[in-house]
Image (cartoon, rainbow, N blue to C red):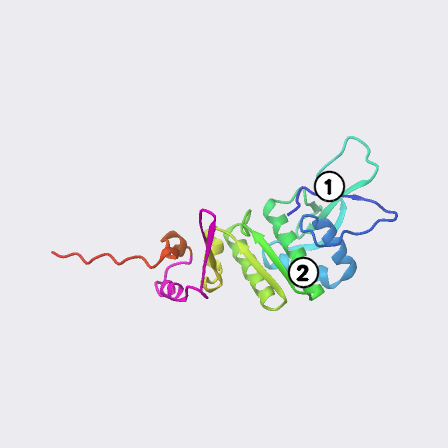
Amino acid sequence: MGKENFALLVKKNSTLPDGKNPGEIIGVFLRAKRDFPDLFERGVLRDMDRVGYPIDSINVGPLVSVRYEIALVNEVVAIRVQEKNQKGLTDQAGMSQGMFRVLSILILINYMECKQQSACLVIDDLGEGLDFERSCLLIDLLREKTEKSKIQLIISSNDKFVMNEVPIVEWSFLQRSGGTVRVRNVENSRELFEEFRFTGLSNFSFLEMDFANGLPAEEPAAHE
């Protein structure tokens, strides 16, 4: 998500990135702040609080966790946040991987919401770096946002927490055999998914018990 990507501050005749590359999260943030100065930042602060990362402010400025021994022509800047109950700023280099991933995702999706344009957001390993509670909170928040907007959300994961939090009717299970990939979902395998739903098992059991290859055969009753 661009945690290792910083930016050089050029003050004269500079242009902002187009805001479309998620790896350039600083550029996305600056463009969003320019286009929607109040609406965008309020949304990011609110959403960060909902997923367990309460912050009072967010900006782009000089790194506070890294020091350079040589003078640079242009100043190196990064995303920085003021965490609640913390005296100093936390820059992206000092954030945990999980916190920075959440912040980047929320910057992207809030910018998409502000623009009110159709968009597709693809996230791999959504729960990486997050504990169970934050992983679930983030999934619920993103699903809620996409239901109310023109954003399509695609999550790829084999994480147990993620699978159990996303309703199985929203799954598309991919099976690869050689160069062929087969997709199973509620649209093309409704009976299979309905049968699984009535088992009462957790969603992860769909993968764990290999339901994608058909309903497990019933074991013959034991006879004395």
Q: Quick one: which residue is furthest to the right in this view?
A: 12
Q: Residue furthest bottom?
A: 148
Q: Residue at x 73, y 41 (%)?
A: 64
Across and down, in percent, residue 132 comes to 50, 52
- Mark 1, residues whose alpha carbon is within 10 Å: few (<14), some, or many (≥20)? some
Q: Which residue is mark 1?
A: 64
Q: Is residue 37 visible?
A: no
Farthest residue, direction top: 69
What amino acid is found at the position of numbered circle 2 in the picture?
Asn
- Amino acid carrying mark 1 in the image: Val
Give the x, y percent position of residue 12. Answer: 88, 47
Q: Secondary structure at mark 1?
A: loop
Question: Does residue 86 sit above or below 184 in this rendering?
Answer: above
Give the quadrant of the C terminus. Answer: bottom left
Q: Which residues are magenta?
A: 175-203
Which residue is the site of mark 2? Answer: 110
Camera-nearest residue between 21 and 144: 21
Give the side of residue 195 with respect to residue 66, left or right: left
Q: Return the x and y of residue 142 as percentages of the image width and height.
A: 58, 61
Q: Residue 87: x percent and y percent?
A: 70, 47
